[in-house]
Structures are given as structure tokens and as C-alpha cells.
Image (cartoon, helix red, strand yellow):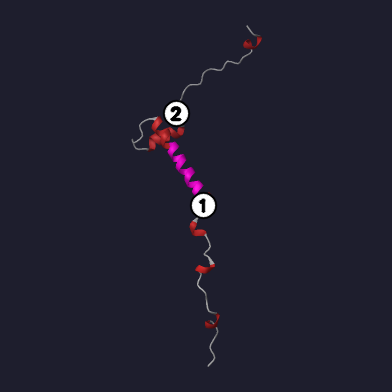
Amino acid sequence: MYPDQNLRLQLPPTPQRGGSTMTKLVIKLSLGLIKNERQASIVLLLFAIIIFLISIRIFAFGFESTKRPTPAATPTINPFLLRPQKN
């Protein structure tokens, strides 16, 4: 027997709680569509993947509506039409 084995700290086994709080919340809010923890964890994984893809789309490609129009697309104003006419 090694002398280290007498000094080891023995922790009691932790009880299994039956899933995380998020999976329990998904099961509760699914109105009976999700029956067990495995289905709830799959739903949470799919939700995380969708949010990740949306954030990549926003940060990598930006918003299309915030781009400035090109100078060729802006209408030109004739400066001679803005002068008052002399009679």
C-alpha cells in the first residue's frame, strides 16, 4: 500500500438531478410536444446552431440596408435650375 492512498480525500457521490434547468424549461414550455430530456437537448442544440448562423450572417456580411448608395445611383441636380430667373 502506498502512503498517498491514506491521504486521499473521499467525496460522496453527487446525486443525479435528472437533467439541466434549460432542458426542464424546454420540456415545460413545449406544451407536450417534447417528451423527454434527449428531445429537449436536441431542440436546444438546434436553437444554438440557428442563433450562431444568424450571428455569422450579421457580423460577416453586415446589413444590406445600411450601405450607402453609389454616386451613380443618386440623382444629379442641375445648378442652373436652382438660380432665380431674371425678368
Report the mark closest to the observer, 1 or 2. Answer: 1
Whether tag 1 and tag 2 are in contact, CB under 8 A, the answer is: no
User: Residue at (53%, 65%) from the top-left corner?
Assistant: 70
User: Residue at (54%, 68%) from the top-left corner?
Assistant: 71
For marks 1 and 2, the one nearer the N-term is 2
Query: Which residue is situated farthest in the front direction here?
Result: 72
12 shown above or below 79 = above
Residue 61 disc label: 1
65 shown above or below 3 = below
Which residue is under mark 2?
19
Residue 51 covered by magenta stretch: yes
Q: Secondary structure at mark 2?
A: loop
Label 1 CA crowd tier, 10 Å (few <14, some 14–19, many 20+): few
User: Residue at (37%, 30%) from the top-left corner?
Assistant: 36
Residues in magenta, as a range: 44-58
Label 2 CA crowd tier, 10 Å (few <14, some 14–19, many 20+): few
18 shown above or below 52 = above
The kind of secondary structure the magenta stretch mainly shows is: helix
* Amino acid of disc 2: Gly
Front in this rendered view, residue 81 or 51: 81
User: Residue at (43%, 26%) from the top-left corner?
Assistant: 18
